[in-house]
Each structure stands twice: as C-alpha cells, then as structure tokens.
Amino acid sequence: MIAFLMQSCYNDSEEKINGITDPNACDTLAAVTYSGQMKTLFDNKCNSCHISQFPNFNTYDNSFNYVKDPVNSENLYFTVAEMSHQGASLTVCEKAQLKKWLKNPAP
Ligand code: HEC
C-alpha cells in the first residue's frame, strides 16, 4: 500500500513540475517588496518610458515618493491595472503583487 502511494505521488509530481516552471507562476502569498518584485516589474514594463516621463520608478526612493500619497497610489493602480495604459499590460499575478505593494510599499 505504501509503495503504491509513493508511486502515485511520483506520478503527480511530474505534472506539478510543469506548473512550477510556468513563467507566469506567482507566489501572491509572499511578502511584496520593491527589491523583491516591484523593481523587476517596473524595469520590464514601465521604465522604458518612465525614465524620462514623470513619475519615475527606477529607484525605491523615487517610487515611494510618488506612491506614499494615497491619491497617487490609487491613481497608479487604476491607470495600469484597470485601464490599458500606454500599451503596458500586467499579468493577473503582477496586478495582485502591485496591489499588495501599494498597500504597504516596503523597500
Ligand atoms: C510606452 C510608454 C509608457 C509605459 C510603458 C508606461 N507608461 Fe506610464 N505614462 C506614460 C506617459 C506618456 C504618461 C503621461 C500621459 C498619461 O497620463 O498617459 C504616463 C503617466 C503615468 C502615470 C501618471 C498618470 C497621471 O495621473 O498623470 C502613472 C502613475 C504611470 N504612468 C504609471 C506607469 C506604470 C506603473 C507603468 C508600468 C506598469 C507605466 N506607467 C508604463 C508612458 C508610459
């Protein structure tokens, strides 16, 4: 019986490997920080324009200076997550992380 269970676990894990290597896989339970997730998101999806275009997200301080104002914070989420903004499109996962980070914009 134990051998049978182990066998079936082994077969299951082969399927899960595909899930884990999925590039869209996302741990929304993890703490979201600027250095952990947001910098990559801003670099990949925003900073091509927002280096020269205010607001600027290329460092934690610049990002925080903008999002510490709740009006800006809400406006940012609305702009990029609920409207289509300048061709920037966020995955479901990135939206979840962004929302979490804006509530608590940790470095
Ligand atoms: C293709 C260029 C481009 C990309 C990519 C881009 N933006 Fe923008 N963004 C702009 C321009 C141009 C403006 C000013 C005009 C406007 O509001 O649309 C702007 C304005 C904004 C504003 C201010 C809106 C306001 O109320 O004035 C925010 C916040 C913002 N962008 C956030 C982001 C975030 C976050 C990303 C990445 C997810 C991003 N943008 C990606 C070009 C871009």
Image (cartoon, helix red, strand yellow):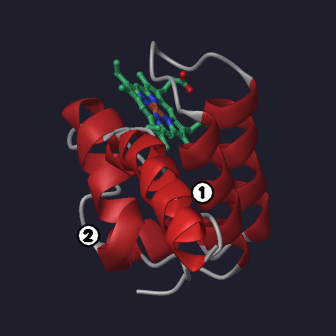
- Across and down, in percent, residue 60 comes to 33, 76
- Residue at screen point 30% across, 62% down: 39
Q: Are marks 2 and 1 in contact (CB under 8 Å)?
A: no
List the residue tagged with mark 2.
Answer: 59
| Quadrant occupied by the N terminus | bottom right
* Side (left or right) of 1 relative to 13: right
| Quadrant occupied by the C terminus | bottom left
**Residue 31 image label:** none
Label 1 beta carbon within 8 A of ligand 1: yes
- Residue at screen point 28% across, 55% down: 40
Q: Is residue 93 above or below residue 86?
A: below
Given residues 10 and 32, the one toward you in this image is: 10
List the residue tagged with mark 1.
Answer: 98
Within 10 Å of disc 1 (Cα), the crowding (few <14, some 14-19, many 20+) is many
Q: Amino acid at mark 1?
A: Leu
Within 10 Å of disc 2 (Cα), the crowding (few <14, some 14-19, many 20+) is some
Q: Amino acid at mark 2?
A: Thr
- Across and down, in percent, residue 104 comes to 66, 82
Q: CA distance from mark 2 to mark 1?
A: 16 Å
Q: Is residue 102 above or below residue 61?
A: above
- Across and down, in percent, residue 61 comes to 35, 79
Q: Quadrant of residue 51?
A: top left
